[in-house]
């Protein structure tokens, strides 16, 4: 693996390169692999070495994690490993070998290692990589098969600068991997223990002033206590979106056993779990004519044609589609135009103060007109005050939900509304 060529202005002042690369990494311009490889390439070229690498110490072995070389057939490759005690790296860290070696053949300790004569090793520089907690991760190294008596303390100081830079990049990646494992562990625990419940918030039809449906909402009691969107976001990040969403939807469907036959359920589902047909499997035995699937603007849809095709069989059997959070951004309007939903749910940010804010009122009125032209129905979310409700009635919004009409409740308390 070879890094990218280093621009001449930076090569002429190599001590600035770690800060340039750090700036790029902070901006998300490159991955950790690319940044560390660029650093290895830079130091190798600058010192006129043949191989540069980062070795990780783990389980009594040295693992080559990053390798850069000018040789057609490098003596080491990413993924190779060997006993730590037989390496230069371990002996540099514990002080048996110096960090800077101009000619390994002149160092008795180095000549005890078979690799010195096998390669052979001529010049060699190696400095420890210490993580933020002080732990030794491994070493930042470069070597050549030929001696180099021009190497000096300035070169060693530059190696240490690059090792410090590499430690920051590697530390970030290790932290990200640790957080990923912790997220996965939390979510596995939630799924195994089913430590979540479903609450149902009423949706009221305004012209008849009656409940016509409920939105099923997931609430988690597992620690740490976080909002549902954080749990679902983390599930997507660690590859458990399907498992968590389908478990929540399956639990929500049990609500039908307690509700009148003319009441529908609105279920939140990510586009991914429509495209992979997970939702099709979960709803196999459900009354589709009583189900609305809500998709939000916050998750992009890259292929609207494929998405619509995936939904077609469900819509043919009576399921309805709702676009959630309409009015919160450009993406929701694109969803509406592309997906032609049966229901458009107006975002709470649009509904808040709709009775006093002329701009919100105008946009709501425009969406009412659009819905009438397109045959969609509107549901206003987050209605919390009587003046907001009065304004929505005046604007002829079809349905509303919010704390003014009813808080999300467990199914036993929801069913009591119809007794």
Image: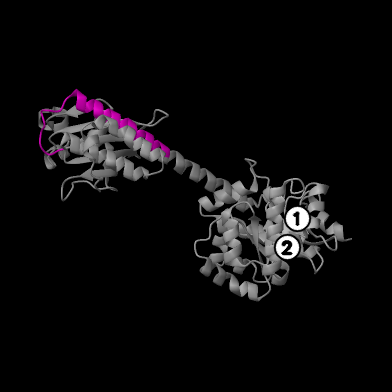
In reply to whether residue 197 is colored magenta, the answer given is no
Q: Which residue is depicted at the point 80% across and 46% down?
A: 385
Q: Is residue 90 left or right of residue 116?
A: right
Q: Is residue 156 left or right of residue 398?
A: left
Pick the residue in front: 406 or 141. 406
Q: Is residue 54 visible?
A: no
Q: Which residue is depicted at the point 70% across and 55% down?
A: 364
Question: Considering the numbered disc 1 on the image, is that residue within a helix, a strand or a loop?
Answer: strand
Task: Estimate the x, y position of residue 337 in percent, counting from the top left.
Answer: 59, 64
In reply to whether residue 149 is colored magenta, the answer given is yes
Question: Considering the numbered disc 2 on the image, is that residue within a helix, a strand or a loop?
Answer: strand
- Specify the farthest residue to the right: 419
Pick the residue in front: 268 or 195. 268
Report how far apart the C-alphas of labels 1 and 2 lie in the structure: 9 Å
Do residues under tags 1 and 2 come within 8 Å of each other at their CB atoms? yes
Q: Which residue is depicted at the point 54% across and 61% down?
A: 272
Tell which circle, 1 or 2, labels the residue nearer the N-terminal end: 1
Relative to 83, is 366 above or below?
below
Q: Is residue 113 visible?
A: yes
- Quadrant of the frame with the C terminus: bottom right
Q: Quadrant of residue 65?
A: top left
Pick the residue in front: 115 or 251. 251
Q: Quadrant of residue 8?
A: top left
Residue matched to label 2: 265
Task: Estimate the x, y position of residue 277 in percent, counting from the top left.
Answer: 56, 67
Q: How many marks?
A: 2
Bounds of the magenta segment: 144-172
Q: Residues within 10 Å of mark 1 (few under 14, many from 20)?
A: many
Q: Which residue is depicted at the point 76% across and 45% down?
A: 356
Task: Estimate the x, y position of residue 75 in percent, counting from the top left.
Answer: 18, 46
Residue matched to label 1: 200
């Amino acid at each position: 693996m070879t890094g990218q060529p280093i621009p001449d202005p930076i090569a002429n002042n190599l001590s600035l390169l770690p800060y340039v690369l750090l700036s790029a990494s902070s901006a998300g311009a490159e991955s950790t692999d690319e940044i560390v490889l660029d650093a290895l390439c830079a130091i190798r070229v600058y010192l006129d070495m043949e191989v540069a690498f980062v070795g990780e110490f783990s389980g009594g072995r040295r693992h080559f994690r990053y390798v850069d070389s000018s040789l057609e057939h490098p003596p080491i490759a990413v993924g190779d490993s060997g006993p730590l005690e037989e390496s230069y790296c371990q002996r540099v860290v514990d002080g048996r070998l110096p960090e800077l070696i101009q000619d390994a053949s002149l160092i008795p300790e180095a000549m005890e290692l078979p690799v010195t004569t096998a390669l052979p090793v001529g010049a060699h520089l190696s400095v420890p990589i210490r993580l933020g907690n002080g732990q030794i991760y491994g070493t930042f190294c470069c070597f050549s098969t030929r001696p180099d008596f021009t190497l000096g303390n300035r070169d060693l100081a530059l190696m240490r600068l690059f090792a410090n830079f590499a430690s920051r990049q590697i530390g970030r990646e290790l932290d990200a991997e640790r957080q990923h494992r912790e997220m996965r562990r939390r979510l596995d625990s939630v799924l195994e223990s089913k430590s979540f419940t479903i609450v149902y918030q009423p949706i009221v039809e305004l012209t008849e002033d009656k409940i016509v449906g409920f939105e099923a909402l997931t609430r988690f009691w597992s620690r740490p206590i976080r909002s549902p969107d954080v749990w679902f976001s983390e599930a997507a990040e660690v590859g458990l979106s399907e498992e968590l969403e389908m478990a929540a939807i399956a639990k929500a469907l049990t609500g039908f056993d307690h509700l009148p036959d003319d009441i529908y359920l609105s279920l939140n589902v990510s586009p991914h779990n429509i495209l992979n047909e997970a939702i099709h499997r979960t709803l196999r035995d459900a009354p589709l004519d009583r189900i609305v699937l809500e998709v939000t603007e916050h998750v992009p849809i890259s292929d609207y044609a494929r998405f619509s095709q995936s939904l077609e069989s469900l819509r043919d059997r009576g399921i309805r589609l709702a676009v959630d959070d309409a009015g919160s951004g450009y993406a929701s309007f694109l969803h509406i135009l592309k997906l032609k939903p049966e229901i458009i749910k107006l975002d709470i940010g649009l509904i808040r103060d709709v009775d006093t804010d002329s701009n919100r009122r105008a946009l709501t009125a425009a969406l009412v007109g659009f819905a009438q032209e397109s045959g969609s129905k509107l549901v206003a979310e987050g209605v919390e005050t009587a003046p907001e409700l009065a304004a929505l009635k005046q604007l002829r919004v079809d349905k509303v939900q919010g704390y003014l009409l009813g808080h999300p409740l467990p199914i036993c308390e929801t069913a009591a509304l119809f007794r």
